[in-house]
Image: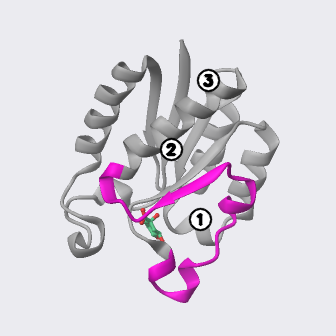
Amino acid sequence: MTAILILNGPNLNLLGTRQPEVYGHTTLADIEANCRIHAKALKLDLGFVQSNHEGTLIDEIHAAKGVYGGLILNAGAYTHTSIALMDAIASVELPCIELHLSNVHAREEFRHKSYIAKVALGIICGFGAQGYPLAMSAMHQHLQATG
Ligand code: DQA
């Protein structure tokens, strides 16, 4: 069975109460539960992790090699700052989809820059919590196509 890892970065543990006008009312636990339902439907094994720490996210990416076929990464604010996360993704050579709940391109200028985009297969942003299953379907199709 194909396995994918969904990695969530800083402050995403606060979803549901954090700026709901931007990020919605859905909690990360709700998102994970929905992803698990979607994973069953797609016959995917799913890892789902959140960390507020850049090094922990990097460790998770390193550990994903040989275990997961692909990564879905909502790196939160590290998207816009972290060369180290970009290098980690490039190092493990796993396909990675960059994901955001909000449309970062319709927001502040500093959110328009993404280091993750430089090593990502593609980007999904602006669809709120629905972006997670969308990204899973996209990764599933990619993994099937590349065998
Ligand atoms: C985010 C967008 C980032 O700019 C922000 O720092 C986040 C969340 C999103 O999912 O919309 O923490 O990644």
User: Disc 2 vs disc 1: Cβ atoms closer than 8 Å?
Assistant: no
Residue 45 placement (x, y as % from top left): 47, 20
Residue 87 falls left or right of residue 35: right
- Residue 144 is tagged as 3
Q: Quadrant of residue 30 in the image?
A: top left
SS at circle 1: helix
Does any atom of ligand 1 lie closer than 8 Å to the CB of label 2?
A: no
Image vertical order of residue 13 relative to residue 83, above or below? above
Specify which label sits upstream in the sequence, 3 or 2. Answer: 2
Mark 1 sits on what residue? 79
Residue pictured at 77% horizontal, 37% vertical = 92
Disc 3 versus disc 2: distance between alpha carbons? Answer: 21 Å
Image vertical order of residue 93 relative to residue 89, above or below? above
Judge by depth and name the residue closer to the eye, 19 or 3.
Answer: 3
Does any atom of ligand 1 lie closer than 8 Å to the CB of label 1?
A: yes
Residue pictured at 29% horizontal, 43% vertical = 31
- Residue pushed farthest right? 91
User: Disc 3 vs disc 2: Cβ atoms closer than 8 Å?
Assistant: no
Which circle, 3 or 2, is nearer the viewer?
3
Q: Range of the magenta residues?
A: 105-130
Image vertical order of residue 123 relative to residue 65, above or below? below
